[in-house]
Amino acid sequence: MAASSLLALLDDITTMLDDVSVMSQVAAKKTAGVLGDDLALNAQQVTGIAAKRELPVVWAVARGSFLNKLILVPAALLISAFIPWLIVPLLMLGGAFLCYEGFEKVWHSLHAKHDAADKKAVQESTQDPQVDLVALEKEKVKGAVRTDFILSAEIIVISLGVVAEAALTQRILVLSVIAVLMTVGVYGLVAFIVKMDDIGLWLMQRQGQGLLPQLNRKFGWGMVSVVPYLMRLLSVLGTAAMFLVGGGIIAHGIPALHPLAELALPWSLLVNAAVGILTGALCVVLVNSVKLFIRKD
């Protein structure tokens, strides 16, 4: 009797873990857009930091990200337990914010001279001996943690939408798994990306004759050369994913657009992208109008 009860318990645990695994995979796919942007933004946050301080800065931001999720996961679980009707509006707001962020990035990229001036000012400030580099580093960490809080909130809310109908234990496990894996994955990749040029330089400086040392030097040169293009690619893919994910959330939340969002590929992607770009443009116009109104007052 005891043996059969134990087997039944193990079977229930195995079934629950399988369900958690499936839901975690679905949640990971739905949050891919946010993760792409999170990765690109955090990799850019450490530009201008001395090479020996890059990893400590990434670790400091990663700690802040874990603290963010320690706040966000319980808050999301409380919402799902006591006010579950708030999940869909939060998802819609989150989707609109993603579209706004994506469109704002595109808008700012059109002002290349302004962006170039900002980058030049940052570079000059880091080379100025009178600048407090410790204070600059702390400001960068604070800014990155603030950005992470917003993006982490998006990840948790989107994941919560996937498991909204699941049992409480499954919701806790899925959100916890997503929070830990996404944080480790994002900041592990950020650490690798920001050190790629140093790793490449180390390989280029390896001495020795023969095929293997030559291949090492060529591979190192390739790593150093690819870093700027990788950063640009991450930024572009992250922006495109924000429109697709944000637009998909909006399209699924509006009954009139829901059938279009369920079309087969590539039409559903086109619908999501169009809804995302339009939503982002409207949000940017609304936010800028409010800013102008406040300034006039």
Image (cartoon, grey):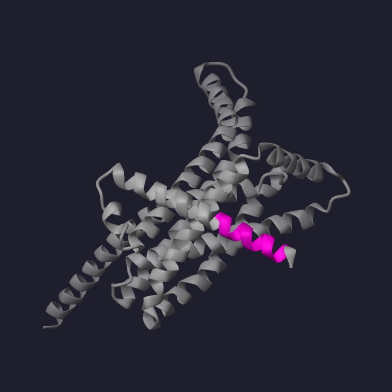
Q: Residue at x 80, y 41 (%)?
A: 124
Q: Is residue 104 above or below residue 292?
A: above
Q: Residue furthest right?
A: 130
Q: Quadrant of residue 205?
A: top right
Q: Nearer the viewer, residue 108 or 231?
A: 108
Can residue 289 be found in the magenta stretch? yes
Q: Is 93 a magenta residue? A: no
* Residue furthest out toward the top: 210
Q: Residue 177: x, y in percent?
A: 40, 64
Q: Main secondary structure of the magenta part?
A: helix
**Where's the N terminus, which quadrant?**
bottom left
Residue at 66 percent across and 37 percent down: it is 112
Q: Residue at x 39, y 72 (%)?
A: 87
- Report the label total: 0
> Quadrant where the C terminus lies?
bottom right
64 relative position to 264: left or right: right
Can see residue 179? Answer: no
| Residue range of the region highlighted in magenta in the rendering | 284-295
Residue 44 position in % (x across, y down): 62, 46
Q: Position of residue 219 (x, y in %)?
A: 53, 26
Instruction: Pinpoint residue 17: horizontal percent, then vertical percent.
Output: 27, 66
